[in-house]
Amino acid sequence: MRAPRTSGQCRWRRFLRSEDGGAAIEFALISTPLFMLLFGILEISRAYWVQGALSYSVEQAARCASIDTTTCGTATQIKAFASNKSGVLFDPSIFSSSNAACGRLVTGSYPFTFSIPFLANNVNLTARACYPA
């Protein structure tokens, strides 16, 4: 014969058979990879945006150096022009300009840091543009 069940045993068995809260547990298990994927997509998108801004600023600075020598006559003016055209507030020191066989060459190099927790990677974004003089 079995021993009579106590109310504590019944509660314990009922708790083990209960399916309440299953969705919360499943969400807890899947939320970490989901948020990592989401933040990774956002950071990669931000890197592409910064690369586009860098490319645009060197293209416009090379064009200005070739066409408008009053605004972009010196290397300092070209760097400042590129920094102002970027929209990202790049420091002018990341740009350089020179005369090349293709015309006025402007290059930019920006160290991009991903803001993903537990993943501290740096990528050096570069862009160059040459406009005939």
Image: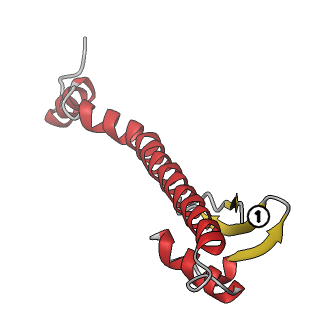
Query: Viewed as shown, does residue 22 lie left or right of 112?
Result: left
Considering every residue shown, the one lying at the far left of the view is: 7
Residue 120 pos. (x, y %) = 64, 62
User: Residue sitting at 85 percent across and 61 percent down?
Assistant: 101
Front residue of 34 and 87: 87
Q: Mark 1 points at which residue?
A: 103
Amino acid type assigned to the residue bearing label 1 in the image: Gly
Considering every residue shown, the one lying at the far top of the view is: 1
Front residue of 90 and 27: 90
Residue 133 sits in quarter: bottom right
Front residue of 101 and 24: 101
Identify the coloring: secondary structure
Residue 49 pos. (x, y %) = 49, 56
User: Residue sitting at 26 percent across and 38 percent down?
Assistant: 24
Label 1 crowd bin: few (<14), some (14–19), many (20+), radius 10 Å: some
Name above or below for residue 107 compared with residue 38. Answer: below
Q: In which quarter of the image is the N terminus?
A: top left
